[in-house]
Image: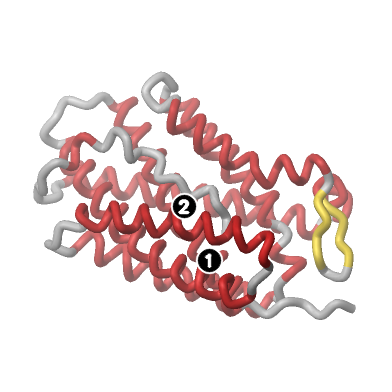
Amino acid sequence: MNNNNSHPFSNYTVLESRQIPAGAISKKFMSGVFLWMFIALGVSAIVSLLFASNLELQSSLYKVVLNKPSFTSLGMFIVFAPILFVIIMSVGFRKLSSPVLTLLLVLFAAVMGMSLSTIFITYTAGSLLTCFASASIMFGVMAVMGYTTDKDLTTFGSFLTMGLVGIIIASMVNMFLHSTLLGYISSFVGVAVFLGLTAYDVQKLKRIGAGIEFQEISANDTQKLIVMGALSLYLDFINLFLLLLQLFGNKRNND
């Protein structure tokens, strides 16, 4: 599982304190969030395919032995670099301008694409397409549920966060234990957690968008919230996709 899954604007979602019916501004806000999420996913896909298909670019990050990547020093840095981007964007949210924050999102997506390029070497094309389609459908269903439900999902936030922390700890422990059973359990729980987080985050973003209609918020700050919302949903989707790959992906033969 990719552990770049902090929920970046959790410390400053002050506009979500009450449910407000979504109007035109709220819908425009949500459209912006999903647009930038799709842009980020597109950047990651393009960069990932570029590195997976170019041996020279591959060699700068990893060497392939029996269809398994062995990372170079630069490759190891690229694997962990997205975490730095999330931290910088979260901590610098109030000080950074919206163009800078948007640029960081695009760079983050590009770096994620580099690190994700290994999945094209590890898994078959069929399983990649199947897991991507499954993740897209599951994400879409939960996003719609989060947007349309009248039930307040705020109370589930702490439980989902606890589940997320538990998965990260279990994944770190399993790096040493190499337990297949623990890996499967962590992945199944992870799928449930990220499905829940998808609905939770979409509802949170809907409330933020609704709050914008009733408060004086500059276009710059609105765009910054859109970018951070896109980052949050991007992380939900990517982690869901990777967990499904771990559970159901068919690995290439070592030949």
Left or right placement of residue 224 versus residue 241 in this view: left
Q: Quadrant of the N terminus?
A: bottom right
Look at 21% across and 57% down and name the residue there.
153
Gap in Å between the C-alphas at discs 2 and 1?
Answer: 11 Å
Task: Give the residue at the far top of this rendering.
Answer: 95
Left or right placement of residue 60 versus residue 162 in this view: right
Q: Quadrant of the C terminus?
A: bottom right
Q: What is the x, y in percent for residue 162? A: 37, 55
Look at 17% across and 46% down and name the residue there.
24
Circle nearer the N terminus (2, 1): 2
Element at label 1? helix
Left or right placement of residue 138 versus residue 253 in this view: left
> Quick one: label 1, few (<14), some, or many (20+) residues within 10 Å?
many
The answer to whether residue 247 of the structure is visible from this angle is: yes
* Amino acid at circle 1: Phe
Look at 41% across and 73% down and name the residue there.
137
The answer to whether residue 245 of the structure is visible from this angle is: no
Left or right placement of residue 102 versus residue 29 in this view: right
Q: Are marks 2 and 1 in contact (CB under 8 Å)?
A: no
Which residue bears the numbered disc 1? Answer: 241
Query: 24 or 62: which is nearer to us?
Result: 62
> Quick one: label 2, few (<14), some, or many (20+) residues within 10 Å?
many
When the figure is inspected, residue 44 is found, relative to residue 86, above or below; the finding is below
Element at label 2? helix
Q: What is the x, y in percent for residue 21? A: 10, 50
Which residue bears the numbered disc 2? Answer: 234
Look at 72% across and 77% down and name the residue there.
251
Q: What is the x, y in percent for residue 159? A: 30, 57
* Amino acid at circle 2: Tyr
